[in-house]
Amino acid sequence: MHLQLQQALAGGVHQHALRSPTTMWRLDLVFPVVGDRQVVVEFDGSYWHRGSYERDPRKAEAIEAFRPDRTVVRVREDPLPLTRGGDVPVPLPTDPFTAASSVVDHLMSMLPRQQETRNRAKAYTRGGRRQGRQLADQLTDERGRVLLPPPEHLSTDRATAHQDRLR
């Protein structure tokens, strides 16, 4: 889904390190919004984030307090409950295009965006799964990224969903 969002929004930084005087965070994705504003997109998979209902919103609030120019949006995979008003629910299983489209629609509705980004996002969501997959494959080829096998503890359905999220 990272590549899908990159195609739809552009300018994103993956696995961005943010350090405060007391804490270091690894942010899944950071996208420019308007001016100095940025949006942080954190992915909360149901396996890795189960039991972190209190920790996840604390991290978001701490990032926003340290960097008021950033808005944190958490993408919460079903069955995880939403933790804050800006969270985006994503069903499990789902394909990367559907998940990314939900995130893009949410971001377009809540944050000011440059017209170029709005046009790019609209073109992405109108293009459908096939175009989204082609664009993600193209980006994957350009980056020479090697997809990792899913963790051994995941079931077949969850392993497929995990692999799709890596694309």
Image (tube, grey):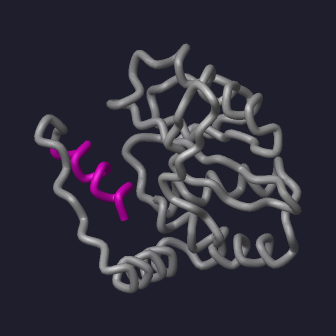
Q: Position of residue 56 (x, y in %)?
A: 55, 24
Asked whether, in this view, residue 33 is left or right of residue 12, the answer is: right
Q: Position of residue 108 (x, y in %)?
A: 78, 57
Q: Nearer the viewer, residue 80 or 33?
A: 33
Asked whether, in this view, residue 163 is left or right of residue 66, the answer is: left
Q: Residue at x 14, y 35 (%)?
A: 153
Asked whether, in this view, residue 86 is left or right of residue 124, the answer is: right
- In the rendered image, residue 87 lying in the magenta stretch gets the answer no
Q: Position of residue 5 (x, y in %)?
A: 57, 63
Q: Nearer the viewer, residue 16 or 41?
A: 16
Asked whether, in this view, residue 48 is left or right of residue 103, the answer is: left
Q: Quadrant of the C terminus?
A: bottom left
- Looking at the image, residue 15 lies above or below residue 115: above
Q: Residue at x 65, y 35 (%)?
A: 87
Q: Quadrant of residue 126?
A: bottom right
- Looking at the image, residue 41 lies above or below residue 31: above
- Looking at the image, residue 140 lies above or below residue 106: below
Q: Position of residue 54 (x, y in %)?
A: 55, 14
Q: Residue at x 63, y 54 (%)?
A: 30
Magenta-drawn segment: 156-167
Q: Residue furthest left?
A: 152
Secondary structure that dominates the magenta span: helix
- Looking at the image, residue 33 lies above or below residue 6: above
Q: Residue at x 51, y 58 (%)?
A: 14
Q: How many marks?
A: 0
